[in-house]
Structure formats: C-alpha cells, structure tokens
Amino acid sequence: MNFIFLSPNFPKTYYHFTQCLKNNGVTTLGIGDEPYDQLSQECRDSLVEYYKVSSLENYDEVYRAVAFFAFKYGKIDWLETNNEYWLLRDAQLRTDFNVTTGLQNQNIDGIKYKSRMKEFYAKAGVPTARYHLVSTLEEGLAFVQEAGYPVIVKPDNGVGAAATYKLKNEDELRNFYANLPEVQYIMEEFINGSIVSYDGICGSNRDIIFETCHFYTEPVMDVANKGVELCYYSKKQIPEDLKDAGRRTIKAFDSNSRFFHCEFFILKEDKAGLGKKGDIFGLEVNMRPPGGYTPDMMNYANDIDVYQIWADMVCHDQGFFDPAHRPYAAAYASQRNWKEYAHSKEEIFAKYGQSIVMYEEMPAVLANVMGDHAYMARFTTDEEVQEFLHYVIEKKEG
C-alpha cells in the first residue's frame, strides 16, 4: 500500500500516524515544506521518502510531488493530512489522482461548509440552530426578528473558531454589515448550551471502531476572542443520548474510514422554538482528529494507541484493542502568561505530579487557543477531574 501523508511534521505528534502505518508494512511517503534535516528524527524514521515543496499552498508544486511518487512507487492508495486546513487540498489531489479511499471534490462540501452540515444533521435526525447565509442587512434584521439576539456569525468555510463573533444588539449587527467580510458568512441563533464532542474512528461502512467524548468548560470562541483558559475533559463512559446522536451523525455524513470530531450543544435551559434543557443539538462535524493534543489525551484516558488503531483501520478496517477498557477520565487545563494564578507550576506538580501525564509550553502560533502553559492529567473519578481543572486556573485574589 502506498500512502502519502501531507505535512507529516505538523502538529509535531503527527509522525505517530506515519510511524504506525510503516509498522504495518505501508510505504509511507511524506510531502511538506519543512527541510528534511529539520524534521524530527521520529518523523524522518517514519517515512520511506520525503518530498520537500517550497509551500504546501502551491498546488502545482504539490501536484508534481504526488505525480513523482506515483511514477516511482505506483498507484497511490491513500492520501491524507488529518488536518482541517487542508481538507479541500486533499480532496482535489484525490480527485486528480483517482484516490478513492477518501473524500473527493464531489462530496467534500458536506464536511467543509457549515451550512451544508445542517443538511446532514437533519438526515441524521439531529436538530441544529436556525441559520441563514449572510447577504443583506435587511435579511439579517429579518432573521434576528425570528431568532432574537444574540446571534453568532462565522465563516461558512472556516477552521475552528477563527473570525467568529457574537452580535448582541442591533448596533453590533449594523457594524458587522458595514464591515462585511469578503468571504461567505453564516449567521446562527445563539444557543445557551454546553459544548461536547463525540470523537473517534470509523471504518469503511461507517461502523464505529473507537469512540469517546470530551466536555468543554468554555466555548472555543470565547477562548480565542476573550482570552479565557481552554479547559476540557473526557468521561470514562459516554452518555447514551450523546452516543446515539453521534453514531447517527457519522452514519449520515460522508465519513468512511476516518477519524471524526463531532461537536454538539447540550441546552442549559429551555428555549421556546428550540428545545428543552438537556436536549442535544448539532454544531459542526470535522472528519479529522480533534485538535491539539486530544489524540494523546485519548491514549492516556484509555491506555490505548489511537494512532495504531487508525493505522489498523487503514490496513485492516478494524482495531485491535479492548473498547470496554476505559480506566481513566483525562483533563486538559491551560494557563496564560498575562494572568496571575493562585498556583504556580511547582505547586501544581507538587499536588498532582503523579496524575500529570503531559506538560507543554505552547509555541506562539498555538497559544491563542491552547494557552501558554498546558497541563494534561488523568484520574479515576469525575470529581478529581473537576478539582484539578479548578486548581490550575484558579486566580489570585485581588
């Protein structure tokens, strides 16, 4: 099997994907814009060959790299980045080289455009927030008459919470339209809900191979725009209503043989015309691993190797692990350089050192969302998780 992995060096842990493929006997071929000698030793060892391009944004150059590998090694069986930013690039390359193991141009819209996602959620029987595609101020005002303030505006084709805003009144709405971005935006009614994700790996028939869930203490939009700390955690058992909604969602979307990251709201209160407290609403679907170090968090929580499970899915359409073995709940908590916290790094390690499985000082390119200092720990009870999160982000008094 010939597998091309674009940008195998970023994020830095992604070499695990090619490493596990290579361990399975796959011919692993990398394309990236980093010089070969600047790749980590682990990344270099995980690849049979690496082709450097000046920029992954240059489609012609990347196309020539794929053509070179196809000429040298034969037909390309898989092409992947596992990165949301390159989804359209992946689809175009698969279309041009007839790689049928992933999404091509004709079926990429459903997982790239937020407005199209609504159609697939509806197919799954999962409700979503009311919305409209941003056009004129008059239509925006009409939508607010129906949905009320606040409303959320974000790029229809966007990555994460980038350029996402909450408009709380007519002045803010008019200002948004007066400075309307050039890209297509979508406007949604605001849902007062907790954000939870259903994450995992599915096989060629969209059967679930591995599944888990993560709960976020704050919306990523507020993390990115307001500087609140990113904190989230897993649970040892997935709530049954979330598991049901997640599985129906995966069956409805074009999601064969992939990692998935499905985001949902859980209503915090009743809302007329929308639903009851505790109801689940679809937010977004991403057919790639959840961001940051979440794959590693899955490993620590479940004593597994999701990179190997993914590689076994690619090679064998199944995983070789015990899905019932879920010994821990894992938690991620971050701190920011410009805030004063009640507890220092030394104090956090003194109290939780035996439970902490990872500590990272984040590079600037990731710190806006991930925080400047990241702590990951695992515990046997949900109560310990909540105590840990509170301890890390507790502020100094005064």
Image (cartoon, rainbow, N blue to C red):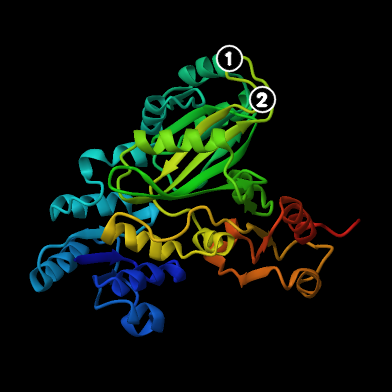
Q: Relative to 53, does residue 37 appear above or below in the rendering?
A: below
At label 1, counting other C-alpha atoms closer than 10 Å, the crowd grade (few under 14, some 14-19, many 20 or more) is few
Q: Is residue 246 left or right of residue 105?
A: right
Q: Is residue 56 left or right of residue 320?
A: left
Where the N terminus falls, by quadrant? bottom left
For badge 2, the amino acid type reads Lys
At label 2, counting other C-alpha atoms closer than 10 Å, the crowd grade (few under 14, some 14-19, many 20 or more) is some
Q: Is residue 170 visible to the viewer in this orientation of the structure?
A: yes
**Residue at 35% in and 70% down:** 20
Where residue 114 sits, quadrant-wise, is: top left
Report x, y in % for residue 55: 30, 67
| Proximity of marks 2 and 1: CB atoms separated by less than 8 Å | no
**Tag in front: 2 or 1:** 2
Instruction: List the residue tagged with mark 2.
Output: 277
Circle number at residue 248: none
For badge 1, the amino acid type reads Gly
**Residue at 29% in and 76% down:** 47
**Residue at 33% in and 55% down:** 318
Q: Relative to 6, does residue 279 appear above or below in the rendering?
A: above
Q: Is residue 53 visible to the viewer in this orientation of the structure?
A: no
Q: Along the line of sight, which residue is nearer the eye, 236 or 98?
A: 236
Q: Is residue 314 left or right of residue 263?
A: left
Q: Along the line of sight, which residue is nearer the eye, 326 or 117?
A: 326
Tell me the SS state at disc 2: loop
Q: Is residue 52 left or right of residue 173?
A: left
Report x, y in % for residue 7: 34, 67
Where residue 377 sits, quadrant-wise, is: bottom right
Instruction: List the residue tagged with mark 1.
Output: 273
Count of numbered marks: 2
Report x, y in % for residue 150: 62, 27
Q: Along the line of sight, which residue is nearer the eye, 318 or 390?
A: 318
Tell me the SS state at disc 1: loop
